[in-house]
Amino acid sequence: MLNITAARRGQKKTLELNIAPMIDMVFILLIFFLVTTSFVKETGMDINRPSASTAVSREKAGILIGITNDNRIFMESREIDIRAVRANIERALAENPEGGVVIVADRESSTGTAIRVMDGCRMAGAENISLAANREK
């Protein structure tokens, strides 16, 4: 008589779980999401923006410049001088040539400072310059 259990015991196969392809896929997905993610650069200050009924939201704001209520200018979380706006915008445009400039001015800041910042942006070669405002409700 044939012993089936003894025959099965001799042909015992071990199962292995190879997770290397799964780890490769996880790293590929991680790299994909890191490359396609756009990071938002902040101005570095909490600014009280004015309101406007015609304000529209923009999807892409490449370069942000903040003007505080005491007319200090901030870009990428650091304070810059009004004379350095042009050089900083030229550097930012070299990194992102299609980026628009958004000036986030406090409602208490002077118009002269905002105009001088806009002038520095235009001299740096920026063509798409906007002023940020909150939408009125």
Image (cartoon, rainbow, N blue to C red):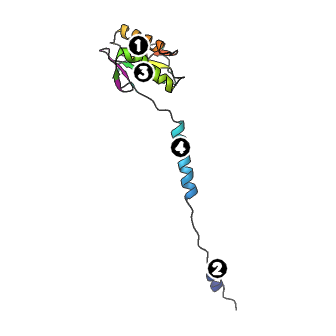
| Residue count near mark 3 (Cα–Cα under 10 Å), binned few <14, some 14–19, many ≥20 | some
Q: Amino acid at mark 3?
A: Asn
Q: Amino acid at mark 1?
A: Val
| Residue count near mark 2 (Cα–Cα under 10 Å), binned few <14, some 14–19, many ≥20 | few
| Residue count near mark 1 (Cα–Cα under 10 Å), binned few <14, some 14–19, many ≥20 | many
Name the mark nearer the viewer: 1 or 2.
Answer: 1
- In 3D space, how far apart are the residues under numbered discs 1 and 2 (Cα atoms)? 80 Å
Q: Amino acid at mark 4?
A: Ile
Q: Is residue 65 left or right of residue 20?
A: left
Quickly name the residue at label 3: 88
Q: Residue 92's x, y, as percent?
A: 46, 24
Q: Is residue 38 left or right of residue 11?
A: left
Residue under the point 53% across and 49% down: 27
Quickly name the residue at label 2: 11
On residue 31, the disc is 4
Q: Which residues are magenta?
A: 68-78
